[in-house]
Amino acid sequence: MVLLSLSMHFNFLPLFLVIAVAWLAPILLSVLKLKNIPSVIIEILFGYLIGLFFLSNQSGDSFKILEFLGLSGFLFLMFLSGLEIDMDQIITSFPRKKLTITGILKNPLLIGILYFIIVVILSYASTFPLSYFIHIEHRWYFALIMVTTSVGIVLPVLKNRGDLSTRYGQMIIIAAAIADVLGIILFTFTAFIIRQGFKFELFYILILFFIFFIFYKISLRLRNIYFLKKLFYQLSHAASQIKVRGSVLIMLIFVVISQYIGEEVILLGAFLSGLLMSTLLHKERSVLMIKLDGMGYGFFIPIFFIMVGVLFDPSALKEFDHSLIWFLIALFVVLFVIKLIPAILWSPLFGKRKALAGGFLMASQLSLIIAASTIGLQLGVITPGINAGFVLMAVLTTLIAPVMFNIIAPKNKFEGEKILLIGGSSTAVLLARRMNVHGKKAFIIENNRERFREIKSKGLQVLFGDGLDISVYEKTKLKPNNYVVISTGNDKRNYEIAELLRKNLMHERIITRACKLPCVEKLQLLGIEAVDVHRVVAIALENLILRPTTYHELVESFENYNLEEITVTNNKITDKQIKEIAFDTNAILIMVKRKENLFIPHGNTYLQTGDTLHVLGTRTAMENVRAMISQ
């Protein structure tokens, strides 16, 4: 049977086995309650097993297809790694004042660069003691393999702990991003020189950066054209999914150009295409990433890691003879030591314990160490045994580093700024998820055991307890600045809990929902913010009728754009005109509230202590504005 000139006699069994493993891995981790272990570890392990028992006798054509899909997954991984890096965070960290030692230590970008330089020096120095166990053909390239890190591991660990939006979290994530960017650039140039020598063609790599700049400038102009904005909006919500197709097209443009420069440049091209998308998308970035993540992590990327397992050859380790165990131990120790020593740079700001924990987290290595090692094997500068050793180290560091981070820097989940949600309704669950996306810690209090287990299975923070029990608020260490949102689904119960919080605990930051006007009025008499459900629904419907485009844009971009109220407390800002204040370029001042008056600000407007500024911007920009306005 032939359809569209494609043969139906192709053997789909290998692809079926690979996809089955990709589907099974996260389910197995969830059932065994091993959610802290990345699914890629299971994918590599299962890949090795199916390669050993099921795929060893498969035809060459089937393997070629799997290798192609695996390489596509690798490129997708590099693309999404670039897209994950928030360039807003890095750009806003550029120093704007005269540099001092204190200023360098407090600047996430500068300290990240300094951290990377120290890691490179230590990594190169460590190749000398390692050479006692094995022969190292190319010390510099071997050192570059060890300096890699994994933003894909660092970011979710910080996010799960609620540290992503903190200064500590920003220091670590920017250091990891810099290690990714500079690491890929360094080993791309090094691989090119090893393969082709110091030739004029080496400067062709710079063409990629020139194309990056040209695309960036052109895209900035094109996205402001009304016709294109309207067209892309219409097509992005249709079957055409134009933004997804455009993202893949941009990735392939960079990959194809890179391929003509040299095979070793392809990964850099894919990474730069993701970085380009990150700088351009801003508010659309989160929505588009969900779709691209579905393509990448749902299909292509698991195939890459499974194929790493399929192609893993443990017999290659026999080349070390009796020195094997000592080489692996030494390499394991070195991979942690080179990341722990420069972590001392964070000690003055966060203390030795947190600095040490950050160093352990930076030692997590996964995709890039496998990439650099694989390319080194193709170049002939590392042996199959060393490559196998690096694959093992990628698995071990990914398993151990996050665990050590959480042990050394334990954090009480109820400490700090948080939001308590009384009642595990579907509204509360949705709100908790949205708050977590904004970097806010949200905890649900639920008194129904079955519902409690259901919410917990979704990965949300939930505590079994009754909102009418005062001991619950003692367990959660409720502070005056913490918001309490009451949403039990019953107006009478909502009122009873609100009354308890107000009268018995003297708590002020209380928000609750009400479906009936009399209940709203009673809550208002207590001084409690009551949300009239019918009114909210009516306003939402009104927006959909009168301003649908604006409404959809605001709803869909909530992950990246925050609207916050910030009170002016910094005396240096008082009596200054707005045009004299260096607001972050990714934040805009919408409105000013002065006592009971609201007005739209202009450049000549003077700010006063106590003014409440309504500011819209990215999460990083909001942090910078808060630091400047509320010092």
Image (cartoon, grey):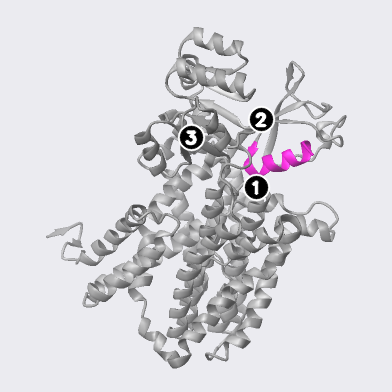
Q: What's the residue type where badge 2 is placed?
A: Pro
Q: CA distance from mark 2 to mark 3?
A: 18 Å
Q: Which residue is tagged 2?
A: 480
Question: Within 10 Å of the Cα at label 3, are there few (<14), some (14-19), or many (20+) other Cα atoms?
Answer: many
On the rendered structure, is 57 left or right of 586?
Answer: left
Residue 397 lies, in percent from the top left, at 51, 69
Residue 507 lies, in percent from the top left, at 63, 24
Residue 52 lies, in percent from the top left, at 27, 76
Mark 3 or mark 1, which is nearer to you?
3
**Image quadrant for the C terminus?**
top right
Q: Nearer the viewer, residue 280 or 534?
A: 534
At horizontal 63% and vertical 82% (from top left) the residue drawn is 126
Kind of element beneath mark 2: loop
Q: Which residues are magenta?
A: 617-631
Q: Is residue 278 visible?
A: yes
Q: Is residue 204 visible?
A: no
Q: Which residue is tagged 1?
A: 166
Question: Within 10 Å of the Cα at label 2, are there few (<14), some (14-19), or many (20+) other Cα atoms?
Answer: few
Kind of element beneath mark 3: strand
Q: CA distance from mark 3 to mark 1?
A: 22 Å
Position of 527 relative to 62 (above/below): above
Residue 489 lies, in percent from the top left, at 42, 21
Helix, strand or loop: magenta stretch: helix
On the rendered structure, is 478 left or right of 316?
Answer: right
As for residue 22 lying within the magenta part, the answer is no
**Mark 1 touches mark 2? (CB < 8 Å):** no
As for residue 618 lying within the magenta part, the answer is yes
In which quarter of the view is residue 95 placed?
bottom right
Q: Which residue is tagged 3?
A: 444
